[in-house]
Image (cartoon, grey):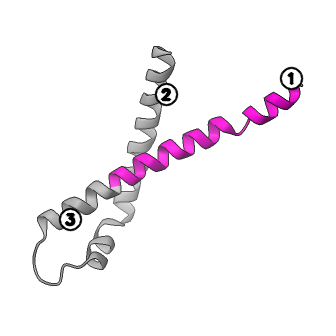
C-alpha cells in the first residue's frame, strides 16, 4: 500500500509547479495586453495587433525568467511558513 501512495504522489509536485508557472505566465501576458491597450489607443489598434506586439521572443524569455523566480520564491515561502 505504501508503494501505491508513493506512485500517486510522484507527478503531483511537477503538475503543481507547471500550474503555478503557467499562472505566472498568464498574469504576465495579461498585464502586457492591458498595458498595450492602455498605451496605444490609436486607430487600427486591434486585438490582433496587440497580440502580435506582445508575443515576442524577448517577452517570452522575460516571462519564463520571472515565472521561475516567482515559483522559487513561492516554494521557499511555502516551505518556510508551513
For numbered disc 2, what is the local secondary structure?
A: helix
Q: Which residue is nearer to you in this view: 75 or 58? A: 75
Percent coordinates x, y for residue 26 in the rendering: 40, 54
Q: Earlier in the sequence, mark 2 or mark 3?
A: 3
What is the spatial separation of the Cα atoms under label 3 and label 1, in whole angstroms?
52 Å
The residue that appears at 18% across and 67% down in the rendered structure is 37
Q: Is residue 61 left or right of residue 17?
A: left
Residue 30, above or below 5: below
Q: Earlier in the sequence, mark 3 or mark 1?
A: 1
Percent coordinates x, y for residue 45 in the rendering: 19, 78
Q: Which residue is mark 3?
A: 36
In contact (CB < 8 Å): disc 1 and disc 2: no
Q: Quadrant of residue 18?
A: top right
Q: Is residue 12 magenta?
A: yes
Q: Earlier in the sequence, mark 1 or mark 2?
A: 1
Give the main secondary structure of the magenta stretch. Answer: helix
For numbered disc 3, what is the local secondary structure?
A: helix
Q: Quadrant of the N terminus?
A: top right
Q: Which residue is mark 2?
A: 75
For numbered disc 1, what is the local secondary structure?
A: helix
Percent coordinates x, y for residue 81 in the rendering: 45, 15
Magenta stretch? 2-28
Disc 3 crowd rating (10 Å Cα; few below 14, some 14-19, many 20+) is some
Numbered-mark total: 3
The residue that appears at 32% across and 71% down in the rendered structure is 51
Q: Which residue is mark 1?
A: 2
Question: Which label belongs to residue 71?
Answer: none
Q: Is residue 14 left or right of residue 25?
A: right
Disc 2 crowd rating (10 Å Cα; few below 14, some 14-19, many 20+) is few
Residue 78, above or below 51: above
Disc 1 crowd rating (10 Å Cα; few below 14, some 14-19, many 20+) is few
Amino acid at each position: 500500500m505504501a508503494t501505491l501512495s508513493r506512485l500517486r504522489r510522484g507527478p503531483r509536485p511537477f503538475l503543481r509547479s507547471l500550474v503555478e508557472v503557467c499562472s505566472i505566465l498568464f498574469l504576465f501576458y495579461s498585464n502586457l495586453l492591458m498595458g498595450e491597450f492602455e498605451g496605444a489607443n490609436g486607430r487600427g489598434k486591434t486585438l490582433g495587433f496587440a497580440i502580435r506586439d506582445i508575443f515576442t521572443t524577448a517577452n517570452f524569455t522575460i516571462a519564463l525568467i520571472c515565472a521561475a523566480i516567482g515559483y522559487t520564491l513561492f516554494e521557499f515561502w511555502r516551505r518556510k511558513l508551513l
